[in-house]
Image (cartoon, rainbow, N blue to C red):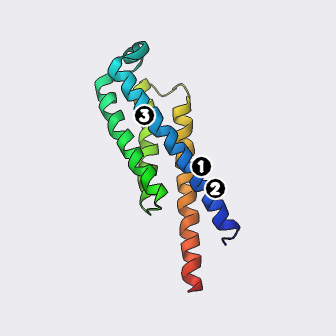
Amino acid sequence: MGGPKTNWLHNIRIALIILVGEKIIQHALVTIAFYFNWMDIRSTVAVPADILMILGAVVTVLYILCFWAIMTQKRWSNVLLIGLALFDIVGEFIAQGRLDITINVSILVAFSLLILAFFYSKQESALIGLHIERS
């Protein structure tokens, strides 16, 4: 059985899986919304909507890859997740076209993913170091 540190790490991993799942759904729906221009969404962004639509599709696929990588415990999943979270945060500023952006669920989830991924990476590295010392 794992100790408190491994249980805590497991809980963070579960949170990451849930939040990445949210990001997959969000990016897929927003990409579809841009394609069909639901509720005139194209008029709400500061950059060409076609670019956002294409990037949204690519990011959706990358979040799916990240989801798989987390589920199968690939070590590189954190690097991908941190990159995607940073992309989402920067992308929100670019899409809104200003620095005083409207805080929405998307950016809150991206910041949560960023913080949890950094923490998970640090804890996982410490745990691996502990296993090496015991060997």
- Looking at the image, residue 77 sits to the left or right of residue 58; the answer is right
As drawn, the residue found furthest toward the right would be 4
Q: Which mark is residue 15?
A: 1
- Vertical relation: 65 (above or below) 93: below
Q: Position of residue 35 (x, y in %)?
A: 32, 22
Name the residue rendered at 47%, 62% in the picture. 73
Q: Secondary structure at mark 1?
A: helix
CA–CA distance between discs 3 and 1? 18 Å
Q: Which mark is residue 32?
A: none
| Residue 89 appears in the figure | no
- Looking at the image, residue 88 sits to the left or right of residue 17; the answer is left
Q: Quadrant of the C terminus?
A: bottom right
CA–CA distance between discs 3 and 2? 24 Å
- Looking at the image, residue 44 sits to the left or right of residue 58; the answer is right
- Vertical relation: 42 (above or below) 30: above
Q: Position of residue 57 (x, y in %)?
A: 33, 35
- Vertical relation: 45 (above or below) 126: above
Q: Which mark is residue 27?
A: 3
Q: Residues within 10 Å of mark 3 (few under 14, many from 20)?
A: many
Q: Residues within 10 Å of mark 1 (few under 14, many from 20)?
A: some
**Mark nearer the N terminus (3 vs 1):** 1
Q: Secondary structure at mark 2?
A: helix
As drawn, the residue found furthest toward the bottom would be 135
| Residue 106 appears in the figure | yes
Q: Which amino acid does the dot numbered 1 rest on?
A: Ala
Q: Which mark is residue 11?
A: 2
Name the residue rendered at 53%, 53% in the picture. 117
Q: Residues within 10 Å of mark 2 (few under 14, many from 20)?
A: few
Q: Quadrant of the N terminus?
A: bottom right
CA–CA distance between discs 2 and 1? 6 Å
